[in-house]
């Protein structure tokens, strides 16, 4: 594993964020608002930051925010350019960038799976904002369940299919439970 930044962030009970690339419009705004709320709090958020919603949330995060960010890459660490909004926080120890590779330039399906396996290995808490049926994220969701990970899901009618006693639905009104 290669990294740049503050490796101690891995010890702060990070919360992995996941959202399918295809997301209904009715989910987009509540999910984005929830993530923006989280980014304003003292919490360490982690993920691949690949879906459109994840990318947008990261762009909207203000430098100097209370949150910390862990960026798990599905390509080589030397091929990654730190987003301008994260540069100052990287220098302040509020960002960690992690990759299994030093020099891989392109993202592919296998690297994404390997990256997600690394996240599963390193993190215990997962928040799913939206899961597309039949996709890679559905598989990851079921793997989290089988590994007894701490799982949260956005409380939205489009996610009700995934609700079960082994996870906790989260909305703006009960987001505080993620800060422990």
Image: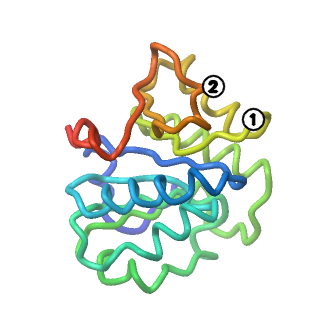
Estimate the x, y position of residue 93 in percent, counting from the top left: 25, 69
- Tell me: residue 11, above or below residue 148: below
Label 1: few (<14), some (14–19) or many (≥20) C-alpha neighbours in 10 Å: few
- Tell me: residue 159, above or below residue 27: above
Label 2: few (<14), some (14–19) or many (≥20) C-alpha neighbours in 10 Å: few
Closest to the observer: 16 or 12? Answer: 16
Side of 153 where 64 appears, left or right: left
Query: Residue drawn at (56%, 51%), measured in percent from left and top?
Result: 27
Where residue 161 is drawn, which disc sits there? Answer: 2
Side of 156 where 113 appears, left or right: right
Estimate the x, y position of residue 36 in percent, counting from the top left: 36, 63
Residue at the disc numbered 1: 133
Closest to the observer: 175 or 46? Answer: 175
Estimate the x, y position of residue 25 in percent, counting from the top left: 63, 57
Query: Residue drawn at (34%, 67%), measured in percent from left and top?
Result: 95
Estimate the x, y position of residue 68 in percent, counting from the top left: 30, 61
């Amino acid at each position: 594993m290669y990294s740049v930044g503050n490796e101690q962030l891995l010890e702060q009970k990070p919360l992995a964020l996941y959202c399918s690339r295809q997301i209904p419009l009715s989910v987009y705004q509540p999910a984005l608002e929830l993530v923006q709320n989280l980014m304003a709090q003292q919490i360490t958020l982690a993920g691949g930051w690949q879906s459109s919603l994840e990318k947008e949330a990261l762009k909207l995060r203000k430098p100097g925010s209370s949150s910390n960010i862990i960026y798990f890459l599905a390509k080589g660490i030397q091929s990654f350019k730190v987003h301008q909004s994260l540069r100052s926080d990287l220098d302040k120890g509020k960002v960690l960038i992690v990759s299994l590779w030093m020099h891989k330039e392109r993202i592919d399906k296998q690297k994404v799976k390997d990256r997600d396996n690394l996240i599963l290995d390193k993190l215990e808490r997962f928040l799913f904002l939206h899961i597309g049926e039949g996709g890679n994220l559905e598989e990851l969701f079921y793997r989290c369940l089988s590994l007894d990970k701490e799982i949260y899901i956005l409380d939205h009618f489009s996610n009700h299919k995934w609700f079960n006693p082994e996870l906790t639905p989260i909305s703006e009104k009960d987001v505080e439970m993620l800060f422990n």
